[in-house]
Amino acid sequence: MTTPEDVVQGDAPELVRVLAADGTLAPTVAAEPYLEIIDSLTDADLEGFYRDMFVIRAFDQQATNLQRQGQLALWPPSFGQEAAQVGSARAARVQDHLFPSYREHVVCTIRGVDPVDIIRVMRGLTHGGWNPYDPKNGNTHIYTLVLGSQTLHATGLAMGLVFDGRSGSGDPERDEAVIVYYGDGASSQGDVHEAMVFAASYRTPEVFFLQNNQWAISVPVATQSRSPLHRRGAGYGIPSVPIDGNDVLASYAVTRVALDEARSGAGPRAIEAMTYRMGAHTTSDDPTKYRTSAEEESWARRDPIARMAAYLRARGASDAFFSEVAAEGAAVADDARVRTVELGTIPTDLMFDHVYSEPHPLIDGQRAWLAAYEASFEEDAS
C-alpha cells in the first residue's frame, strides 16, 4: 500500500512530476498524459512562471518583515508553496472563479489583486480586502480565515453555474469553472467533506486544490490521515490526482486539464499538491518547536524556485533575465513597504459595521463600552 511518506517523497506511482528536484526533466509515468500541454508552453510562459514565483517570494519576505516591525497584526507566509500556486492560477481561464484560503498570495496577484490589499487584511484595515466582482480582481474571492469554509462558498457558486447554464456547454472560452484552495489541516474540517458531497451530487464545474504542506500548524499530516489525502476525493466519486507541488509545470498541466474537464460537464476534480511550508504557519508560530532542521533542509533541496531556475538555465535563459527578475522582486517589495507604512489606521467604529444588517443592541452596547474605555485614557492623562 502507498503510504503518506511515499507520496511526500515522490515515490508513489500515481504522482505527477515533470521536473526533478535538480531542475532536470524527469517525468514520472503518471505525468506522460500531460506532456503535450507542457510542450506547448513557450519560453515566455516558462519565464513567466519563474517571475511569478520569485517576485511573490520577495513580497512575502517583505510582508513578514513588516509584521515583525509592528506594521501588520499577522502574516501567513507562502514561502515554499509558490509552484503549486503559480501553476494552478496560470492554468485558470479568465472567466473562472478562484477561492483562496489565506496563504495564496500569488494566486491573488496573478489575477490582478493589488498585493497591498492583502496587507490591508492582515493589518486589520478592512473586513474583506477587495471586491471579487470588480473586473480588475479577476473573479478572485476574498481570503477566508475560517478553515475550510471557502470550499462551501466555492461549491455554492459552482452549483449556481450549473443551475444558470454557465458551464457544460462545450465552449471552453465561455464556460466557467471554479477552483478552491485549502490545506491539509483544513481537509479534516467537516466543511470540506460537505462541499465534496454537494459538488459530486450536482456535478459542479469545480476543482478542489489541496496544498499539502505537511503541517496543520504543529500537527503532521501523518497524524491527520493514515492514507494519502487525495484518496478522500475518490471516496466521494471525485477523480483525484496527486502532484509534486514544488513542480510548477506539473501544477499547471494537471490543473489545466482538471479545470477543462470540470467546466465541460464532467463534474468536480481534486488535486493534492505535495509541497512544504518552509516558513512558519503564521508569524505567531514557532516551527522549531515541532519540526526538525533535517526535515527543513530536506525540503529546501526541493525548492520550487531553484528548481525552475535550473531548468531555465539549461534551456538557455540569460543572466540578464535573472537579474531583471531580481530587480523586479526588489521593486515590488520596496513598493509594498512604502505603501504599507502610508496606510495609517482606521476609525475603531469600523469593527462594528456589517456585523448585523440592522441596528442591534448588543453591538450598540459594545460600541459604547469601547468609546468609554478609550475616553478613560484621556482622563488618566489629564
Image: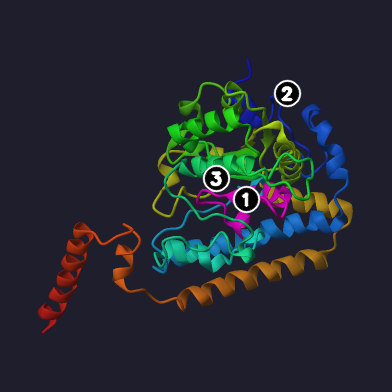
Q: Whole-percent x and y of residue 3?
A: 59, 21
Q: Quadrant of the N terminus?
A: top right
Q: Which residue is mark 1?
A: 97
* Region of the chain picked out in magenta, as a range: 85-108
Q: Which residue is mark 2?
A: 13
Q: Whole-percent x and y of residue 253?
A: 77, 41
Residue at x 51% of width, y 55% of height: 142
Give, as a three-letter code, the residue at label 3.
Arg
C-alpha separation, residue under disc 3 versus residue under disc 1: 25 Å
Residue at x 61% of width, y 58% of height: 57
**Could you classify mark 2 by the number of other residues whose Cα lies within 10 Å: few (under 14), some (14-19), or many (20 or more)?**
few
Q: Whole-percent x and y of residue 318?
A: 85, 63
Q: Whole-percent x and y of residue 2?
A: 63, 19
Q: Is residue 74 above or below residue 186?
A: below
Q: Is residue 46 above or below residue 215?
A: below
Q: Quadrant of the C terminus?
A: bottom left
Residue at x 82% of width, y 53% of height: 312
